[in-house]
Amino acid sequence: MQRFLILQVIGPHYHQEDALSNMAEAVLLVDTYGGLVVEKSTQHRIHPDPNTYIGSGKLEWLKTAVREQKIDVVVINAIVNSGQLFRMERALWEVNTKIAVWDRVDLILNIFEQHDSSVEAKLQIQLARVKHTGPRIYGLGKTALSRQGGGIGTRGLGETNIEIERRNIKKLQQRIEKQIAARAHEQKNRIYERQKRGVKTVALVGYTSAGKTTLFNILTGKEKKSHQSLFTTLDTVVGKIKLQQYIPAVLVSDTIGFIDELPPVLIQAFRSTLLESMEAQVVLHVIDVSDTKMFDKITIVEDILHELQATQTRIYVFNKIDLLSLEQQKILAEKYTGKSVVFVSAKTGEGIELLKEKTEALLGR
């Protein structure tokens, strides 16, 4: 098991509570990856250091921590410039020649690589990797895209080969984009054919671990495995939900869960995977009512849907109501007056029939 150190830089306008929440989510991401967090640290800075992001003083502390704690991977819990990560990693070579320095995107991408199952997911991860890795792709890291040769005393390609590699990577990116575009075109044609035949579609969206997969199973009768880990659903899975008005059935899709600070490069890369959600007639926004950051996560999901230009009718599905009192349900319902709201428990089945009725009513509108 790889040993991880997580480092978070806190700016002057960043609340301590939010920083702790983000750190806890990073720990869960590392756990999902299969690593062990042995050290966590924060640094207060007005601006990230333009050279190494964390500055020279913190870098010296980091060298000591990496050596003494036998750290394999340092995770900067933010979206960091590739050049800054490269210089940080290079500085740490003097204490660990095999050290890896990742930012939040790298960590998520490495988790994605563990769970990809379809050709589309593999292509999308590869594209996001190429776009994000930048200069580190030349001989750094442990991914398929970075297994390049090296010279004496270095861990990368010689300077004379950099331009050749840049051209090769640009060609690789264009090739991947072309393959993804071709598959997206096929998918759009399938969706169009469905629409012509009058097939109705519903999509489940929500923050990761909100209970979408459990709800998908209870609606469709499928037995898709659900996990406590993040990002176990990368590919869109489609099932059928039987509603009285629609014969033989309505199609419902379960998609990738969203997360705070989901980088634009990942949203763009997974646009074709999210196509089912973007084209569905009704979107079920699944929300975990037991989550203390519930309202923040609702906003995060809504912002990503807005970025994806998903404007369909929405039902706010407050899940896990077996953990909520009737008074708390009433307060939530009042807060969302004027919106379609359903309280369910995907675990016990409570509220599922009402959810089906509301979905059917919106599909018929």
Image (cartoon, helix red, strand yellow):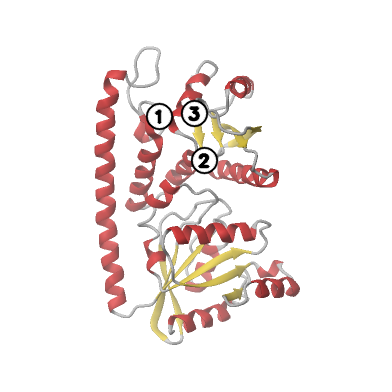
Identify residue type, mark 3: Ala
Left or right: 256 with respect to 321? left
Q: Mark 3 or mark 1, which has the lower sequence index?
A: 3
Find residue 152 and report its horizontal and vertical position in percent: 36, 12
Q: Is residue 247 above or below residue 262?
A: below
Residue 176 - label: none
Instruction: Give the residue number, with chain letter if any, for mark 2.
Output: 104
Furthest toward the top, the residue is 152
Instruction: Give the residue number, with chain letter if any, for mark 1.
Output: 136
**Residue at x 40%, y 35% (from the top left corner):** 133
Instruction: Give the residue number, with chain letter if any, for mark 3.
Output: 100
Find residue 145 and report its horizontal and vertical position in percent: 35, 34
Identify residue type, mark 2: Arg
**Residue at x 64%, y 20% (from the top left corner):** 68
| Closer to us: 312 or 127 | 312
Q: Quadrant of the N terminus?
A: top right
**Residue at x 75%, y 74% (from the top left corner):** 327
- Label 2 sits on a secondary structure element that is helix
Q: Is residue 226 visible to the viewer in this orientation of the structure?
A: no
